[in-house]
Image (spheres, rainbow, N blue to C red):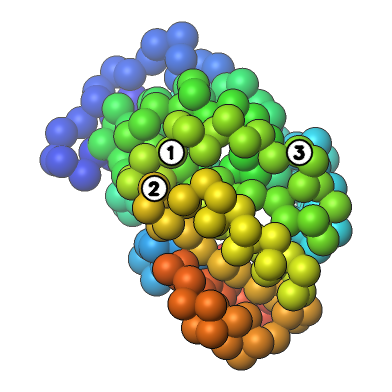
């Protein structure tokens, strides 16, 4: 089996025990990256099934259960069919499945640029630092702030990103305090994102400007291209 490699090389016959590992997958799809510093780029999303968190504003609750069992080799074959060099492993909470680390390693070794969207409730140490790790710190109104694994902040590099999804002013003030206390803006890009349909974009933008915060305002681009309820985009 040959895997896509943006460098022009092919990893022919890649049939190690790693690629035969099993993961439960909700969906694999090709879309426009809607969030983060890579927003606007075509990207293949591998959405793994399962999440131990229950954020009250979660927009992917359909990924909590179900899914299809796939080998890593089968996942890579489906990803390769899109001919896109950027891949994001997401969920659910992808790190809830131990095989996610091996999947990302295999994607990297196949020449892909790899991103990980994670709640940060799981240890980031096993994740290859070549992966762009996007850690979603949970604000109080999510109902899951006690699940934040603060030790993960020490593992972040300028290559990574921290995201805050904010439901209102109290969440914003909490996030502003966390950014200051941990000097996050000096560590990596910091993203402030409003809960879609709940926190007004202009309000959040005005708070950021008034406080002179060195953070990036983020809207979920894909929810403006397609209907917000549309799956697989």
Q: Is residue 99 above or below residue 68?
A: above
Residue under the point 33% across and 46% down: 158
Q: Which is more N-terminal, label 3 or label 1?
A: 3
Q: Residue furthest left?
A: 8
Residue under the point 43% across and 38% down: 156
Q: Answer yes or no: do the residues labelled 1 and 2 have beta carbons within 8 Å?
A: yes
Measure how far apart labels 1 and 3 are at the Cα level.
Answer: 18 Å
Say which quadrant the N terminus sits in.
top left
Q: Secondary structure at mark 2?
A: loop
Q: Secondary structure at mark 1?
A: loop
Q: Which is more N-terminal, label 2 or label 1?
A: 1
Q: Which residue is mark 2?
A: 187
Q: Position of residue 162 (x, y in %)?
A: 51, 52
Q: Is residue 76 visible?
A: no
Residue under the point 62% across and 58% down: 177
Q: Which mark is residue 156?
A: 1
Residue under the point 48% across and 33% down: 154
Tell me where residue 10 sits by quadrant: top left
Q: Which residue is mark 3?
A: 147
Measure how far apart labels 2 and 3 are at the Cα level.
Answer: 22 Å
Say which quadrant the C terminus sits in.
bottom right
For label 1, the crowd category at 10 Å Cα-Cα, with few meaning under 14, some 14 to 19 and many 20 or more, is many
For label 3, the crowd category at 10 Å Cα-Cα, with few meaning under 14, some 14 to 19 and many 20 or more, is some
Tell me where residue 121 sits by quadrant: top right
Q: Is residue 117 above or below residue 127?
A: below
Q: Secondary structure at mark 3?
A: helix
Q: Position of residue 81 (x, y in %)?
A: 39, 47
For label 2, the crowd category at 10 Å Cα-Cα, with few meaning under 14, some 14 to 19 and many 20 or more, is some
Q: Answer yes or no: do the residues labelled 1 and 3 have beta carbons within 8 Å?
A: no
Relative side of 181 to 41, left or right? right
């Amino acid at each position: 089996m040959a895997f896509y490699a943006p460098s022009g090389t092919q990893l022919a016959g890649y049939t190690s025990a790693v690629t035969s590992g099993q993961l439960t997958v909700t969906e694999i799809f090709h879309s426009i990256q809607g969030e983060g510093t890579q927003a606007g780029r075509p990207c293949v999303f591998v959405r793994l099934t399962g999440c131990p968190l229950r954020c009250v504003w979660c927009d992917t609750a359909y990924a909590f259960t179900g899914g299809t069992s796939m080998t890593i080799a089968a996942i890579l074959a489906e990803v390769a069919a899109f001919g896109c060099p950027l891949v994001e492993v997401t969920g659910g909470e992808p790190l809830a499945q131990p095989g996610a680390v091996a999947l990302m390693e295999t994607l990297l070794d196949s020449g892909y640029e790899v991103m990980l969207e994670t709640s940060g409730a799981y240890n980031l140490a096993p994740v290859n630092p070549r992966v762009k790790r996007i850690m979603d710190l949970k604000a109080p109104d999510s109902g899951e702030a006690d699940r934040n694994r603060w030790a993960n902040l020490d593992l972040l590099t300028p290559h990574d990103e921290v995201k805050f999804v904010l439901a209102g002013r109290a969440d914003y003030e909490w996030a502003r305090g966390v950014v200051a206390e941990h000097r996050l803006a000096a560590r990596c890009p910091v993203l402030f994102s409003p809960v879609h349909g709940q926190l007004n974009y202009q309000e959040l933008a005005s708070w950021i400007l008034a406080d002179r915060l060195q953070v990036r305002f983020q809207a979920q681009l894909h929810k403006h291209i397609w209907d917000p309820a549309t799956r697989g985009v």
